[in-house]
Image (spheres, rainbow, N blue to C red):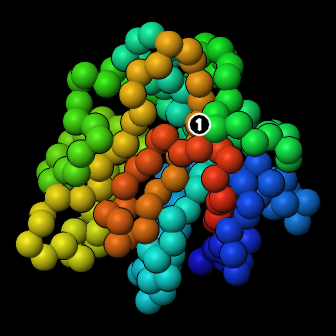
């Protein structure tokens, strides 16, 4: 079993950039990516520890929005987030859409910015890319939906609206009380908490 740790331990970093640089100063190469966070939550849950579900966890998985279009590209481990300057305080990074290879989606081709049924989660192209292990995704979704009583939708994927300019942002996965949403519109000047091992 890997030794997963929240970073910082007792509070959130002041900004995403400061948190990334603090964890690198502490000897970690990078925070976990989105899929690694999902696996960590399941690993800990299987050993009887449910605490990782209680926190929103920021990741090094990036979301690129192509200006003036419906195209969005997901980058599993985004170097521009890992190498971000400590003093960066903008909401997003402006950089070329073609800078990194990734998984490209068209917003109009699937459901976004709304909660999903369990079957919709299991069939969703983004959830299947984010968690390529189908058994892991199924088990994870069962955990999340086990907390739902009457409202049987959860685990939505939130994207920002189309803008004229190209931007990139970091993804986070929300806590279980906020439906474990895959949130792709995070402001980089917001505070952050990561998972490392």
In the picture, measured across the screen, residue 94 lies left or right of residue 107, that is right
Please identify the quarter of the rendering in which residue 80 is found: top right
Q: Position of residue 135 (x, y in %)?
A: 31, 58
Along the line of sight, the residue nearer the viewer: 150 or 197? 150
Please identify the quarter of the rendering in which residue 10 is found: bottom right
Q: Residues within 10 Å of mark 1 (few under 14, many from 20)?
A: many
In the picture, measured across the screen, residue 110 lies left or right of residue 21, that is left
Residue designated by label 1: 169
Furthest residue to the left?
Answer: 150
Q: Answer whether residue 52 is visible to the viewer in this image.
A: yes
Residue shown at 49%/40% (left/top)?
185
Q: Position of residue 150 (x, y in %)?
A: 8, 72
Residue shown at 22%/36% (left/top)?
111
Callout 1 secondary element: strand
Furthest residue to the bottom?
Answer: 48
Residue shown at 29%/49% (left/top)?
156
From the image, which quarter does the N terminus lie in? Answer: bottom right
**In this rendering, is residue 10 above or below 100?**
below
Along the line of sight, the residue nearer the viewer: 60 or 86? 86
**In this rendering, is residue 85 above or below 149?**
above
From the image, which quarter does the C terminus lie in? Answer: bottom right
Q: Position of residue 113 (x, y in %)?
A: 29, 41
**In this rendering, is residue 123 above or below 20?**
above
Please identify the quarter of the rendering in which residue 142 is found: bottom left
Q: Position of residue 36 (x, y in %)?
A: 55, 57
Q: Answer whether residue 20 is visible to the viewer in this image.
A: no
Residue shown at 51%/72% (left/top)?
55
**In this rendering, is residue 145 above or below 192?**
below
Give the total of numbered labels.
Answer: 1
């Amino acid at each position: 079993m890997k030794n997963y740790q929240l970073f910082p331990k007792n509070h959130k970093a002041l900004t995403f950039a400061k948190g990334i640089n603090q964890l690198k100063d502490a000897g970690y190469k990078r925070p976990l990516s989105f899929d690694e966070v999902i696996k960590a939550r399941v690993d800990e849950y299987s050993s009887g520890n449910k605490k990782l579900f209680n926190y929103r966890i920021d990741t090094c998985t990036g979301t690129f929005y192509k200006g003036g279009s419906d195209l969005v590209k997901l980058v599993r481990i985004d170097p521009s987030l890992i190498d971000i300057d400590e003093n960066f305080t903008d909401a997003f990074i402006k950089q070329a859409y073609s800078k990194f290879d990734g998984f490209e989606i068209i917003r109009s081709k699937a459901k976004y910015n709304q909660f999903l049924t369990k079957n919709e989660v299991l069939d969703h192209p983004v959830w299947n890319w984010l968690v390529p292990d189908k058994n892991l995704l199924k088990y994870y979704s069962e955990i999340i939906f086990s907390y739902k009583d009457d409202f049987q939708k959860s685990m939505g994927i939130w994207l920002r609206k189309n803008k004229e300019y190209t931007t990139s942002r970091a993804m986070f996965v929300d806590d279980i009380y906020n439906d474990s949403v895959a949130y792709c519109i995070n402001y980089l000047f917001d505070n952050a908490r990561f998972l490392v091992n």
